[in-house]
Image (cartoon, helix red, strand yellow):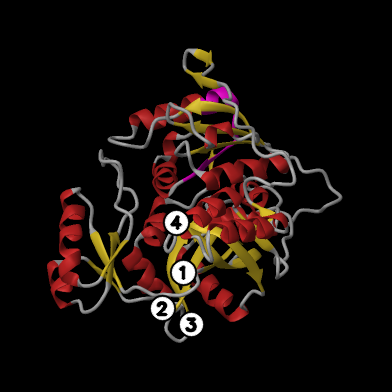
Amino acid sequence: MAPAPAPLDPGAPDPAPRRALIVGPAGDRGAQAGARALGQAGWTVGIGAPAGPGLLGAARAAAVRHEVPCPRGDGSDFIDGVRRALAEGSYDLVLGAGDDWTAAVSAYRRHIPAAVAHPVPEVLAAALDEVRLAERASRAGLDVPRTLPGTDASLAAWEGPVVVGCRARWVPGRTRPGPFAPELFPDAASAAARVHRIRAAGAEPVLRRPVHGRPGALIGVHHDGRLHGRVQLVTSRLSPPPDGVPVRARTVPVDDALAARAEALLRGLGWWGLVELQFVPGEQGRPHLVGLGGRFSGAVALAEAARPGLADAWARLALGRPVPRLPDARSGVRCAWLAGDLRRAVAERRGGLAADVADTLRWGLVARHGVEDPLRPGPDRRPVSRRSAGGDRSR
């Protein structure tokens, strides 16, 4: 567990260290938004990513980019890369971007000479395992879609459409690139080949009943048994449609009953820190929990735009420092990822290409932006410096 923080007195100086390292895939948009949010809160932010160009490494909020290999095999290259980055940047805190990087940071925390902004591996494993999460969420009073391990018996007994995915997002020692993304099939027979491919890759498949509707999320920082800085989002556009990442959303009043059940789940898990609970309405409009994350993501980027301070509070909490009091986000705030929404418009063409692009621009001009803002200069797209064990290099 993280050290218990004290509320922040706005009139008192905050002695917290202000240097954070985000490690993750080079193109992770949520992590870029996290770097921007921490930078705006006064943090010096470094990026650790594999070699090669990428949007994450070009974020203006990042002071420097470090080369950190992907967490594969026995993890030794990943650990060495993180340790080099910490030594070069004198960082106080490490945050993961992407489920596999987050799980690796947590799993290898005893080898990392800095604070880790994620729960211990046992808590993360329970939260990122769809079967175990569904069981715990149901006990906490949350609605969940039917979710079963992808065994031959459960596949043979399954009726109707099915979503096939992986139980674990990351497993230590795995050398393959990672789990398969969830995929929808009309019936169990057509899903069988996907189940077998997941097994052949050394992963464990999971079967889930699909739920349809406008996705939403409940986001905040969980500590002391409560969810602080609550932001409830309803998504109206996804890229790519129909099952991509949120590109257009708005805040709605927090459903206190839903939040109370979510807090019961988080307390049962032993969760602390940033959390995103993903919901999709079921047939009767009741929100069904379909996922839980504890990292920067597209939805978290939109939430941070609507309720600034989430990233800063999370980082302070991980260091055991005073945490600012965070009220709920106000409802009716529009949030957008403009570049992603424009790509969606080109692909989807609602009412025609010109009409969809014009609607996207109108929405974007009055929305908060998690990554770039068309009314202000966006993130610097120029390469930033890279560091290795041998010193500074430029690309």
Name the kind of residue labelled 1 in the image: Gly
**Residue shown at 54% from the left, 48% from the top:** 30
Number of other residues with Cα within 10 Å of mark 2, as a class: few under 14, some 14 to 19, many 20 or more: some
Q: CA distance from mark 1 to mark 4?
A: 34 Å
Of mark 3 and mark 4, the one earlier in the sequence is 4
**Residue shown at 48% from the left, 44% from the top:** 97
Q: CA distance from mark 1 to mark 2?
A: 9 Å
The disc label shown at residue 139, or none: 2
Q: Judge left or right: residue 249 versus residue 43.
A: left
Name the kind of residue labelled 4 in the image: Pro
The disc label shown at residue 286, or none: 3
Helix, strand or loop at label 3? It is loop
**Residue shown at 54% from the left, 66% from the top:** 351
Mark whose residue sits in front, 3 or 4: 4
Q: CA distance from mark 4 to mark 2?
A: 34 Å
Measured as percent of width and height from the top left, residue 287 is found at 49, 77
Q: Is residue 88 magenta?
A: yes
Residue position for label 4: 240
Mark whose residue sits in front, 1 or 3: 3
Helix, strand or loop at label 4? It is loop
State the extent of the magenta-drawn residues as a range.
Answer: 85-97
Measured as percent of width and height from the top left, residue 348 is found at 47, 60
Helix, strand or loop at label 1? It is helix
Measured as percent of width and height from the top left, residue 333 is found at 70, 65
